[in-house]
Image: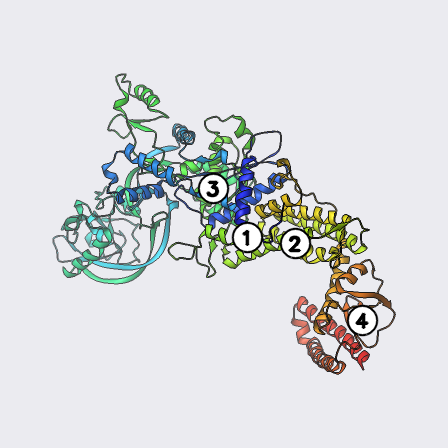
Amino acid sequence: MEIASKYESQKVEKHWYEYWMSNGYFHSTPDEREPYTIVIPPPNVTGVLHMGHMLNNTIQDVLIRRARLMGKNACWVPGTDHASIATEAKVVAKLKEQGIDKADLTREEFLKHAWDWTDEYGGVILEQLKKLGCSCDWDRTKFTLDDNMSASVIKVFVDLFEKGLIYRGFRMVNWDPEAQTTLSDEEVIHEEKQGLLYYLEYQIEGSDEKVTIATTRPETILGDTAICINPNDERYTHLKGKKAIVPLSGRAIPIIEDDYVDIEFGTGCLKVTPAHDINDKALGEKHNLEVIDILNADASLNHHGLHYEGKDRFVVRKEISKELEEKGFLVKTETHLNKVGTSERTKAVIEPRLSDQWFLKMEELAEPAIKAVLETGDVKLFPKKFENTYRHWMENIRDWNISRQLWWGQQIPAYYYGEGAEDFVVAESKDEALEKAIVKTGNSTLKISDLKQDEDALDTWFSSWLWPISVFNGILEPENKEIEYYYPTNDLVTGPDILFFWVARMIISGYEYRDKPPFENVYLTGLVRDKQRRKMSKSLGNSPDALGLIEEYGADGVRVGLLLSAAAGNDLMFDESLCQQGKNFANKIWNGFRLVQGWEVADLPQPEASKLGLEWYNAKFNQTLLEIEDHFSKYRISDALMAIYKLVWDDYSSWLLEIVKPAYQQPIDKTTFDAVLAIFENNLKLLHPFMPFLTEEIWQHIAERTPEEALVIAKWPEANKVDEVLISGFDFAAEVIAGVRTIRKQKNIPMKEYLELSVLNEADIAKDWDTVITKLTNVSEISYVSEAVDGALSFRVKSNEYFIPISGAIDVDAEIKKIEEELKYTKGFLMSVEKKLSNERFVSNAPDQVIEIERKKKSDAEAKIETLQKSLASLK
């Protein structure tokens, strides 16, 4: 194949992705090999690719491609989540544009619109992941509302209900007025917001006395059903048994006593609104108070709201405070910092609301999941620091509110046959529900038409917590071949923000339904932020177009750019220059390949320098491979990439290719050429998980390959014993080469001009590397001498001094002046160090490592002075 002068990422990426897909490299079926399984954190069906997805899925692809190269049966299951709240909101918005109100539709009619929307937009993000190079088993793509996935959810609900773990209760819940559904505690974000504290006067019935009460929500006074005082508060003892008049409404409410009220806080009087505060609800139950709910589902005021009926709560807050002030009820206002609960999904301010909801008891279920992470280590979190977060959440776990007032999702399988609180059955189907209802009631005349299914849907997380099991149909067929082979999965890659929402709950369901954890390791990525450390968001306009980056820099360039600075658990400060760095790396590799392919090959003897250089590089490759394996074992993916980056950029491109490169317009010997190609192929194998497109393109250019010989399924290199002597020998040679090059640069001596190099052999050093030093510095010969060489510039490498006679090549007077100045400066520096070391107070008080640093400065300065003096003597 002809090699293009420039790497064309878009053309290459499309070609090779189609090739991989057509040859079925990503598809997995159970066989005799060791399985390696990852399940994708299913993105919302409403989603499009953003930087967080890019990072998360690049890491997963690195892991799965490496496992494939290691000969494992690699299976990466993709899919999407139905995302009840987000999707329903989008469908409602679209219907509104068409002049259709959800309230005017039946459930079935609305769901048809929702499915139409999903069919049109639902697969967008998965197609975008292909452009990133993700090697998922697309034949296994799942959706959380697929028939068998939903059936699994319903089966689990019924099972947990029958075990007594699911119950229905009238509770104070978190209400999202925008989505018009309840939320679990974990879906509420508490933010500190500046607000006002309103001091209101309530008149005592039958007297002129008034009590002052402070509230942050003056609109809720319309739902007040008591005033509460502490029985030990002497200021209000005389009010016991009396009543107070609610401002504006004129209702008389009892004054109750309870030591829940803090005497020292505020005015010592508390308004009690049982329908709108969880603590007030507890007081209401204890004192048998009336419950007055003043809000509609959309947080506008209902008929209890007097003349504010139909107005939004925040509009009412402004208007009612003005009315209270005008009528003399508002004493004063103060600025007040308050924690306000907001919806994670819609950002709406949450309202506490009393409602009949379904709950899952969590305390008992959580025990095995706590042990798995914090005691036995059956599930390992990377980085380990997140164990503390996990512990806090799990040890303070509350019952999970699993019902949502939505239509998009699995409908709760509870069927009502009467009006009583217990007049329902839970079953997997209506037919089964009818049988259970007949048994429960003893009424054989009941018909299916007498049953009414619960209107609520299940929380989306209640389907995704089964994901690692349900994608292999392990709930409906718990002993099927696939679940037995692929479960538990190996690694989970996700963000720490859903450590509880999803990760912990999956561990819980894994133990409940498989008696095993769902995965062995959890790699928690950081958040992608901008250079100013701000979270990426559309509203800030700081989130780049993910597909635009791929088009500009190539998928490989973007992958490398993201991973080079994406240490586990640490936020990534994204800068587009990182992608440019990745693109530059791709070009470096491409140009290095073109260089090698451009060499003419001949049947010649192998030069000693090439032989030695190849032996060194193989040793360096083995050393780096062991380092990479260690990084992977600790999930330091960015460190693994950096090790490969340095190996390819520095050791291979900058050193090895220079060592073996033939002279201008001269051929290379076949032995060296073949060895360089073999080395390059091993480099490509290490690079492939990170840069799949570029590496496959070059791999296929190197030789004619059958589909069975594609890089995507090649064999990962095996590390051999590291030859440390070769590596240290080269390091020594590299310092010598650097010394000669520095002198050339300082004295403007061109490379084409030969130099002589003499070595004052004070120590017995290996001369094996002389051929490499000679080639890379263009010295005519290296001689070993027993005394310093006059009239030569010198430099020191370890205990050996190197001399380069340069008579006629430089201005001697100028060189003498320069050396004298440097000598003067170095002597002055030495004096300052010696003065510090002779100071007894410094030596006795400074840490040992600080003193050691100063002593090293002294010895280095003395060695430099000796070298400069010799250089000066040789020039005079």
Image coordinates for residue 169, horizontal then vertical, percent:
31, 36
Mark 2 = which residue? 592
Image coordinates for residue 638, horizontal then vertical, percent:
58, 52
Distance CA(mark 3)–CA(mark 2): 38 Å
Q: Nearer the viewer, mark 3 or mark 1?
A: 1
In terms of sequence position, does the residue under pointer 3 or pointer 2 come before the other? 3
Element assignment for label 3: loop
Report which quarter residue 811 is drawn in. bottom right
Q: Are marks 4 and 1 in contact (CB under 8 Å)?
A: no
In terms of sequence position, does the residue under pointer 3 or pointer 4 come before the other? 3
Mark 3 = which residue? 41
Distance CA(mark 1)–CA(mark 2): 17 Å
Q: Vertical placement of 67 versus 334: above or below?
A: above
Q: Is residue 247 left or right of residue 770?
A: left
Q: Amino acid at mark 4?
A: Phe
Distance CA(mark 3)–CA(mark 1): 24 Å
